[in-house]
Amino acid sequence: MIRRRYIDPGLSLEAVAREVCVSKRQIQRAFEAAGSKGFKWELSRVRVLAAAKLLRDNPRLTVSQVAERVGLRHRSHFAALFREHLGATPQQWRETWRARVRA
């Protein structure tokens, strides 16, 4: 479900629980049983990986536009998540990618 709906800014554990008619805790347990860090972490990971692909493939998109396309409204929150998952800000990651391509 996360991979299909990650662009929805309103996607949340609560929304998913309502949609599939289970408790939030049941979903959390399912993620834990699968060895995951949890719903929010998985959602942010999917969004960041999609954003990295957009940054790589669409150099004309601004970082803010990329954030919006992956379901994040605030550039600062997007940058923090990006750094948490990939170790660099979106702009730093894009510049590193471009330098590798040129080399």
Image (cartoon, rainbow, N blue to C red):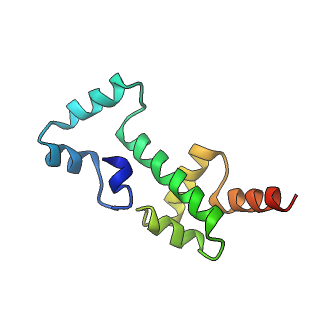
Q: Residue furthest right?
A: 103
Q: Nearer the viewer, residue 87 or 97?
A: 97
Q: Nearer the viewer, residue 91 or 98?
A: 98
Is residue 23 shown above or below 7? above
Q: Is residue 38 left or right of residue 49?
A: left
The image quadrant that residue 84 belongs to is top right
Q: Residue at x 59, y 74 (%)?
A: 61
Is residue 15 shown above or below 67? above
Is residue 86 shown above or below 55? above
Q: Nearer the viewer, residue 76 or 15?
A: 15
Is residue 36 shown above or below 74? above
Q: Residue at x 47, y 53 (%)?
A: 47
Q: Residue at x 34, y 31 (%)?
A: 31
Question: Residue 23: percent from the left, percent from the top?
Answer: 16, 36
Q: Residue at x 62, y 65 (%)?
A: 57
Q: Residue furthest left?
A: 21
Question: Residue 45: percent from the left, percent from the top?
Answer: 48, 45
Q: Is residue 100 left or right of residue 54?
A: right
